[in-house]
């Protein structure tokens, strides 16, 4: 069942009438797959505990006001990671695989992907995009502690578009513009949300 779950993006990307699938090309490849899958599953299950212990470690050095935002901040970090991981799993990975299959067929290539490469791609994209969705929280925290302000964020907006396009092109493995735009556009949307939240945070801080 677990293997079927991990293969779901590939099955969505493959045409129902095509017999393509995963293969291994070396005796040790299956162990590489096991390690990658174990890492992905273990990290996903341990993330709430990691955040909890990090919060417990830094809590003694924080003020009462800072402690009041620590717990919801950790919870929000976990939620943002899960949203990013799910977005990658259900949208980006199948779209990337479909684009790769399309171009392979366009050039007349046979598609035989190795299992370790596929699971490596799946792990990289799910983890990488999960972490990339954390940046609005980082931005708001930096505004909260006074390192940056909303005016700077607003002036940085044109550069953020270029940065997000570059990051999306690096994280997504395909060269078609549609796939990396699927990641760049949500990141730009999150940037706008972080800007709005930062303005509210500044307003509350100045009111105090």
Image: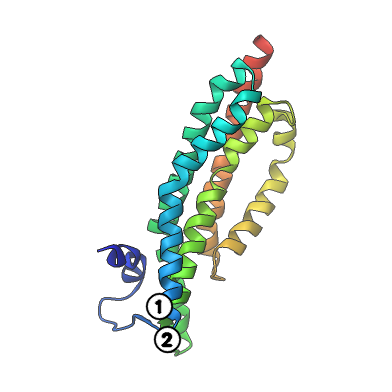
On residue 30, the disc is 1
Q: Position of residue 73 (x, y in %)?
A: 53, 31
Image marks 1 and 2: residues in contact by CB distance under 8 Å: yes
Q: Residue at x 46, y 83 (%)?
A: 104
Q: Among all residues in the image, which is located at the extreme top? A: 208
At numbered mark 1, what does the secondary structure look like: helix, strand or loop? helix
Q: Nearer the viewer, residue 28 or 171?
A: 28
The answer to whether one can see residue 87 in this image is no
Quadrant position of residue 89: bottom left
Q: Label 1 to label 2, Cα distance in Å?
A: 7 Å
**Residue at image x 45%, y 56%?**
88
**Residue 204 left/right relative to 186:** right
**Quarter occupied by the N terminus:** bottom left
Give above or below for 106 relative to 124: below
Q: Quadrant of residue 192?
A: top right
Which residue is denoted by mark 2 in the rendering? Answer: 27
Work out whether residue 152 or residue 204 is closer to the camera in this orientation and state it: 204
Between residue 62 and residue 99, name the one nearer to us.
62
Res. 41 image quadrant: bottom left
Residue 105 seen in this snapshot: yes
Name the spot of residue 34 as percent of width and height, x first: 40, 69
**Against 73, is 42 above or below?**
below
91 over 144 or under it: above or below = below
Is residue 129 toward the left or the right of residue 93 in the image? right
Q: Residue at x 45, y 89 (%)?
A: 109
């Amino acid at each position: 069942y677990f293997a079927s779950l991990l293969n779901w993006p590939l099955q969505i990307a493959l045409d129902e009438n095509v017999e393509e699938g995963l293969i291994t090309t070396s005796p040790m490849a299956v162990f590489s797959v096991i390690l990658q899958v174990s890492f992905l599953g273990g990290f996903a299950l341990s993330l709430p505990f990691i955040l909890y212990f990090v919060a417990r470690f830094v809590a003694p050095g924080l003020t009462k006001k800072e402690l009041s935002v620590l717990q919801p901040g950790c919870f929000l970090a976990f939620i943002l990671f899960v949203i990013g991981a799910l977005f990658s799993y259900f949208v980006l990975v199948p779209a990337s695989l479909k684009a790769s299959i399309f171009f392979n067929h366009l050039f007349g290539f046979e598609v035989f992907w190795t299992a370790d490469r596929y699971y490596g791609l799946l792990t990289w994209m799910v983890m990488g995009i999960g972490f990339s969705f954390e940046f609005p929280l980082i931005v708001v925290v930096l505004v909260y502690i006074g390192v940056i302000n909303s005016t700077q964020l607003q002036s940085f907006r044109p550069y953020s578009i270029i940065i997000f396009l570059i990051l999306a092109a690096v994280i997504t493995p395909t060269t078609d513009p549609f796939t990396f735009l699927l990641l760049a556009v949500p990141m730009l949307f999150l940037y706008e949300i972080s800007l709005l939240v930062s303005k509210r945070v500044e307003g509350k801080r100045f009111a105090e």
